Image (cartoon, coloured by chain):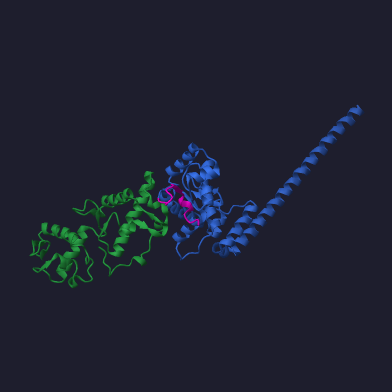
Amino acid sequence: MRRRGIGMHGLKQKQTARSHYRQFGEQLAHERVAMMEDQLSKFRKVLEDFAFRHKEDIKRDPIFRKHFHEMCASIGVDPLASNKGMWSELLGFGDFYYELGVQAVEACMAHRPANGGLMEIDELVAQVNKRRGGKVDSVSKDDVVQSIKKLGKLGSGFRLLQIGKRTIVQSVPGELNRDHNMVLSQAESQGGWVRSADIERSLGFTQDRMQQALQALLNEGQAWVDDGHEDGERRYWFPYLRHVK
Amino acid sequence: MVDSSFFSGGGYAYPDFYAYPPYFTLQPVKETREKQMSCWRDLVVSFTRANRVFEFETKTFELFENKSINRSLNESARKAIVDDLCAHGLGETCEGSGGGTVRVLWRSLQEWQSCVLDWAHRTGRRGDVLTVEELCDSSEVAGEEFRGMPPSMMERILRTLEKQKKVMIFQGTDQDDLGVKFL
């Protein structure tokens, strides 16, 4: 009996201890969560204060804006995530990038017939600033990149590509495959145009492969032909590289 | 053909595309060619208006060659541009030129008609008789927009006005000399 009593007692004791442990553990976890929440809200407050204090700088200075974005990104806050969030209310950011996005789309559309929907980012920035006019502060490359990334999320076919040394905004759906990329990079390296001979020699394409790549680029309006050179060899020009010297 | 007193070719601001070689080759892809044609159409109209060119020879038109980039439109490209211009009502090939001479309508024929009539009314020419030559180029029309217009083009405009009973045209003493009376 006694042994069993001890047994029962021991068991009960163990149970009590376990539940105590659990309670304590829960309490601890609770406290930690509360602490985290407290810290987060403090942090948020600090970030808000910071943003508010530097509101004008963020709005006006593209470089400051870039740093602010980088800071936000590194701690996992996206000031552009929602148009309704505190950030857009605080800074008017939602409107800023919305407006910028619209201007970027308009600039891309206006030039699409001439360049087949490929435009260098610097050119787009220049075009967007032209559209905005001289009365407002000009936007930076980073701003336009941000707005293009936002547009991309809408599945609108807008995206950024890296071709050769350049960052290109593509405003038409459709893939540029590896061959197209190689042809464009080759053109970039020699001043914005290529001949068949250049592609054969530098890229080692067969006739078929070359024709396919060039024809696809022509069909998309991303390449234009030029038969006017005195050597009589056809050149393929790529309008997005128009300003390459 | 070009009124030298108004000529300002040097100061004319050419669009960007004019220095981009592929615009001088007729593009094989339809959408691209349409873009190319619309660029040329705008350029031809703005260039001729700025330099007061009323007619040009398709084969030798200076605008169709850009020496600074060593490019010149070939015959079929020139023809395509002219055809496009005509299709948009901005040009017409001159009668009897075999299609080689193009009249650019940087003002429509209707606009030219009212220009001429307006001048006649403004300067009290009703009932007066002038030669077509005088109407095209004389001190009488100094400063008028139609000054320097080729007589053949003026005749084209007057013939329409004649049908509307606004003027009367009659043969002068010389073979080529046409007289016009504003009614």
Which of A236/A41 is in front? A236
Asked whether B156 falls inside the magenta stretch, the response is no
A27 lies left or right of B110: right
Give the position of the N terminus of chain A as an image quadrant: top right
Q: Is residue A155 visible?
A: no
Q: Position of residue B135 (x, y in %)?
A: 16, 67
- Which quadrant of the structure image shows residue B133? bottom left
| Residue at (77, 43) in percent of width and height | A25
Which one of the lettered chains is coloured green?
Answer: B
Which of B86/A77 is in front? B86
Count the numbered circles shown: 0
A228 lies left or right of B104: right
| Residue at (33, 49) in percent of width and height | B77
Asked whether A229 falls inside the magenta stretch, the response is yes
In the rendered image, the vertical position of residue B116 relative to residue A74, given as above or below: below
Q: Position of residue A31 (x, y in %)?
A: 74, 49
Q: Residue furthest front?
A: A231
Q: Main secondary structure of the magenta part?
A: loop
Q: Position of residue B76 (x, y in %)?
A: 32, 48
A202 lies left or right of B150: right
- Which quadrant of the structure image shows residue A66? bottom right
- Which quadrant of the structure image shows residue A7? top right
Q: Residue furthest top?
A: A1
Q: Position of residue A126 (x, y in %)?
A: 48, 59
The part of the chain drawn in magenta is A228-245
Which of B49/A92 is in front? B49
Q: Is residue B64 visible?
A: yes
Which of B111/A230 is in front? A230
Of the chain colours in the picture, the one used for chain A is blue
Q: Residue furthest right?
A: A2
| Residue at (49, 38) in percent of width and height | A207
